[in-house]
Every structure is written in C-alpha cells, then in structure tokens.
Amino acid sequence: MSPLAWVAAGGVAASLLAFGGGVSVGMGMGEDREFAKRAREDSIVDKTREAGQQAAAAVIAANRPRNVTIRQETEREIQTRTVYADCRHSPEQLQRINDALIGRPVGIGGGQLPGGGTP
C-alpha cells in the first residue's frame, strides 16, 4: 500500500475516533445538563413548599379563639317567643311532668302490668 493510502486511512480513523469521542462527551454533557436542570427544579419545588408551609404556619399561629357569649340573645328569644304558653295538660299528666323534672321516679300506670288475657 502506498503511504498516501496509509495517511488517508489514519485520517479516517482519527476522524471516526474524534467523532465518537465528541458524541460521547456531548451525551455526557447532556446528561449533566439534565441532572442540573432536575436539581434546579427540585430546589424550586422545595423552596416553594417551605415558603407555603411557613405562610400556613404564620396564618395558623395568628388565629386566636374568640369566645362569644350569646346570653342576651337567648334571653330575648325566650321572652319574645311564647309558643308553648297555650300548652295545657291534665292534672295527672302535669304531676308526672313535674315529677320527671325534679327527678322523682315516675310511676306510669301505678306500677301495675296489664292483664295477659286478650291481646
């Protein structure tokens, strides 16, 4: 083979090696760039999450319980709404209600069970 063919073959081999090396380095750089991009996005997500948690904690900490007495409203309601004023009971029933209100045992039916004859 002539020396020119050897030089040409060497040049082609060198070109192929340079191309292969360039592709390999370029792909490695692409992977590194992708890893850096993911790390940057993860960092943004973490910072956003932390800021949201801090804001929520601040709002929760600012909440104070508020105790409101509605006693006047209840008294007014009782005074103005006299729906049950017309309710009437028999004397026996009124006695049973009063006994139940003070906690006295209420004897319904005088403590007697009904007869077992007819259903």
Image (cartoon, helix red, strand yellow):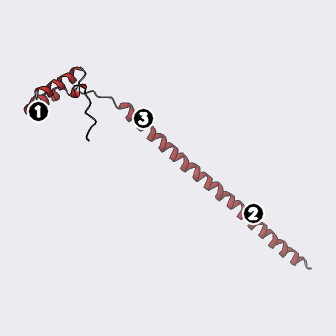
Amino acid type indicated by mark 2: Gly
Q: Which of marks 2 and 1 is in front?
A: 1
Numbered disc in front, either 3 or 2? 3
N-term mark: 1 or 3: 3
- Please tell me whether mark 3 sits on a helix, a strand or a loop: helix
Residue at x-position 7% and y-position 33%: 86
Q: In this view, does 84 lie to the left or right of 5?
A: left
Front residue (pair 88, 57):
88
Q: Name the residue under label 2.
A: 21
Q: Which residue is drawn at 11% across and 32% down?
A: 84
Label 3 environment density (alpha carbons within 10 Å; few <14, some 14–19, many ≥20): few
Mark 3 or mark 2, earlier in chain: 2
Give the quarter of the figure containing the N terminus. bottom right
Q: Which residue occupies the foreground of this view, 76 or 3? A: 76
Disc ID at residue 57: 3
In the image, taking residue 2 as reference, residue 33 lies left or right, namely left
Which of the two labelled residues, at mark 2 and mark 1, occupies the earlier sequence position? Answer: 2
| Residue at the right extreme of this rendering | 1
> Which picture quadrant has residue 115?
top left
Q: Which of marks 1 and 3 is in front?
A: 1
Q: What element carries label 2?
A: helix
Mark 2, Cα crowd under 10 Å, few <14 / some 14-19 / many 20+, is few
Q: In this view, does 21 lie to the left or right of 109?
A: right
Image position, residue 47 (x, y; %): 50, 43
| Viewer-closest of 58 and 83 | 83
Vertical relation: 98 (above or below) 6: above
Task: Residue at 14%, 26% (x, y): give it.
Answer: 92
Distance CA(mark 1)–CA(mark 3): 50 Å
Q: Residue 84 carries which label?
A: 1
Quadrant hosting residue 10: bottom right
Q: Which amino acid does label 3 sit on?
A: Ala
